[in-house]
């Protein structure tokens, strides 16, 4: 042990490097390189919901506002000891019951403005599995992605397992692939796979999602076990390259009960049959009209030929003129010649 009068030791080079890496990690955790689990469009009331996918026994949940240099506590909730809202947010936020999990709470921000845009996080303490954190990003309306048209439609009954698969079409290596659920004012990240290392991030979505992840894979699959009506919506698969190129495919999932599914199938089949009958009817009418026109053209040709032949046998024009003027006097001018007697020799 060094004596008090000795100067303190300098950190070894390895300790300095470790300290620098720790600072860099903290900066990324609080800075702009942060990954989000849910993106919400700014509205008059913003609801931040955090529900563990497996609904573990909740012991405590706390919400934070994340800035580039700090992590500010907003509110905390304990099932036995109640709730506490921090002083700067009293009167601006409420804790309401989660519609999907009554033992959980949703942080509701009233009269939200541009000042509330940014990153938030909720930290769940569960027993016996420990802590679980989710990052939520609030963005202005002009930065929120608009609704997109689906590329494929999937219909399933309630309680079934739904599998969504997409295979990359473009050439070249990809950096990552993500699956998202797109809603009118909210986008939830379902899974993210790093294709360079073949590792995926743990899903913070509020229900269980099974997915595939492998190094350099070009075919991605997610499975939604025992779907319900709340699982209906748009699901987007996004392949991204380090060069900025990407490829997107969107599924439209509709979850119905048995009766509605049968009605949907009958409606689809009936619509297809009606469309086919309509096409056949139009084709028949076109054929009938075409045949009638052909017959008319064929009938007109002999009549025109007969009329031309009859015209050829008509009397010449001068004959008709004579007959037409038979009752009229005709005057002809002849030259007059003088008749003189010949001289006799």
Image (tube, rainbow, N blue to C red):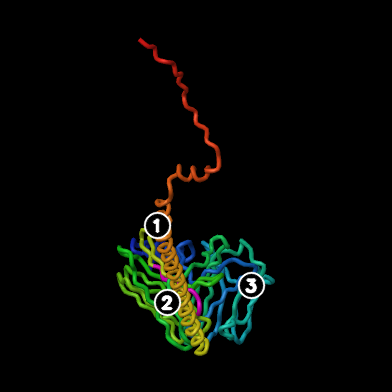
- Picture quadrant of residue 216: bottom left
Q: What element carries label 2?
A: loop
Residue where numbered disc 2 is placed: 202
Label at residue 305: 1
Q: Residue at x 39, y 14 (%)?
A: 342
- Picture quadrant of residue 245: bottom left
Say how many tags the image has. 3
Residue found at the far front of this picture: 345
Label at residue 86: 3
- The front one of 244 and 107 is 244
Which portion, as a residue range, is magenta?
232-238
Q: Residues within 10 Å of mark 3 (few under 14, many from 20)?
A: few
Spatial separation of the CA atoms under disc 1 and disc 2: 89 Å
| Residue 17 vertical position relative to residue 327 in the rendered view, above or below | below
Q: What element carries label 1?
A: helix
Asked whether the viewer can see residue 55, the reply is no
């Amino acid at each position: 042990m060094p004596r008090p009068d000795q100067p303190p030791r300098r950190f070894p080079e390895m300790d300095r490097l470790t300290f620098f890496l720790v600072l860099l990690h903290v900066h990324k955790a609080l800075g702009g390189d942060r990954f989000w689990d849910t993106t919400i469009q700014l509205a008059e009331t913003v609801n931040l919901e955090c529900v563990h996918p497996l609904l573990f026994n909740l012991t405590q949940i706390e919400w934070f506002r994340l800035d580039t240099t700090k992590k500010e506590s907003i509110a905390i909730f304990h099932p036995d000891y109640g709730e506490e809202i921090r002083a700067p947010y009293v009167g601006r936020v409420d804790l309401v019951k989660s519609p999907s999990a009554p033992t959980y709470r949703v942080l509701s921000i009233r009269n939200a403005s541009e000042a509330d845009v940014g990153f938030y996080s909720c930290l769940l303490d569960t027993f016996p599995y420990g802590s679980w954190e989710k990052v939520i990003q609030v963005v202005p309306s002009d930065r929120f992605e608009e609704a997109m048209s689906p590329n494929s439609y999937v219909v399933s009954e309630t309680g079934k397992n739904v599998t969504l698969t997409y295979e990359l079409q473009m050439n070249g290596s990809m950096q990552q692939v993500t699956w998202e659920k797109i809603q009118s004012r909210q986008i939830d990240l379902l899974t993210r796979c790093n294709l360079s290392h073949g590792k995926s991030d743990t899903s913070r979505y509020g229900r269980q999602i099974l997915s595939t992840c492998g190094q350099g894979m070009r075919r991605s699959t997610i499975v939604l076990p025992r779907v319900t009506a709340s699982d209906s919506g748009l699901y987007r698969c996004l392949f991204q390259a380090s060069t900025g190129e990407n490829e997107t495919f969107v599924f439209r999932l509709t979850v119905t009960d048995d009766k509605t599914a049968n009605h949907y199938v009958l409606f689809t089949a009936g619509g297809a049959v009606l469309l086919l009958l309509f096409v056949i009817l139009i084709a028949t009418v076109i054929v009938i009209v075409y045949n009638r026109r052909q017959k008319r053209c064929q009938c007109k040709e002999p009549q025109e030929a007969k009329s031309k032949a009859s015209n050829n046998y008509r009397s010449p024009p001068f004959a008709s003129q004579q007959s037409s003027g038979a009752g009229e006097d005709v005057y002809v001018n002849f030259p007059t010649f003088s008749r003189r007697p010949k001289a006799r020799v």
